[in-house]
Amino acid sequence: MAEVIAMLEALRDITPLTAEAAAARFLGQEWTPAGKVRDGVETSWDKGGVGGWIQTLGGGAVSVSFFVWIRDVDQSGYFDDLDAVYEQGEQVLADFLPEIEASPLAGHLIEAEATEADRDEFVKLKKWTLDSRILTAGVIQHDTDLPVMVMVVLEEPCAA
């Protein structure tokens, strides 16, 4: 998880956060490119069992996401005990949150209220503002036949 904290610290001072600048920081932190280039920028990275990716959204917004834990579906294509998998993810998240809150980022984090959209997307989450950005850590599953992951997402809001 130290890889994620170090990258969040490296990304914090980039203003505005762009895909190009984020990719340069991944490279500078010795993450391995995964060969997924979009618009001339490497968007997928790996380091120490952690995956990271950069996504450019509409209006110039940029999101940098990390998966710090992943549990894939069973051979059946589903989970035999989805509640148990969610509990595992929630425990990983509970173990990881103190690392974020004790990091050098702590002095810049302000706890934020989860929105209804956040609660629809995440099984469990914690959200902060980090300067003008949104930092969310949570357990997520995008669809019933997709993995359950613990993710950390740093989002640069759209430029006004």
Image: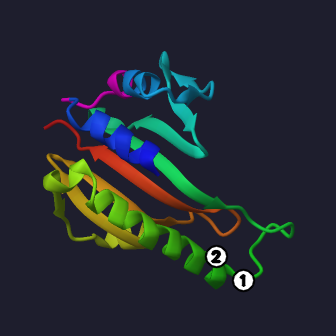
Image quarter for residue 148?
A: bottom right
Instruction: Inspect the image, locate mark 1, and give the three-letter code of the amino acid beneath it.
Output: Asp
Q: Position of residue 94 (x, y in %)?
A: 43, 73
Q: What residue span does the magenta drawing correspond to?
A: 15-22
Q: Is residue 21 magenta?
A: yes
Q: Is residue 122 visible?
A: no
Is 70 left, or right, of 73 in this rendering? left
Outermost residue toward the right in this view: 75
Q: Is residue 14 visible?
A: yes
**Spatial separation of the CA atoms under disc 1 and disc 2:** 7 Å
Is 71 left, or right, of 155 in this rendering? right
Q: Residue at x 36, y 47 (%)?
A: 5
Disc number for residue 129: none
| Label 1 with label 2: CB-CB less than 8 Å | yes
Disc number for residue 85: 2
Is 71 left, or right, of 62 in this rendering? right
Q: Position of residue 18 (x, y in %)?
A: 31, 27
Q: Is residue 47 magenta?
A: no
Q: Which residue is mark 1?
A: 81
Q: Position of residue 12 (x, y in %)?
A: 24, 38
Image quarter for residue 89?
A: bottom right
Image quarter for residue 63?
A: top left
Outermost residue toward the top in this view: 40
Q: Position of residue 92 (x, y in %)?
A: 51, 68
Name the foreground residue: 25 vs 58.
25
Instruction: Inspect the image, locate mark 2, and give the three-letter code of the amino acid beneath it.
Output: Val
The secondary structure type at the circle numbered 2 is helix
Name the foreground residue: 71 vs 99.
99
Mark 2: give few (<14), some (14-19) or many (20+) Cα within 10 Å: some
Number of numbered tags placed on the structure image: 2
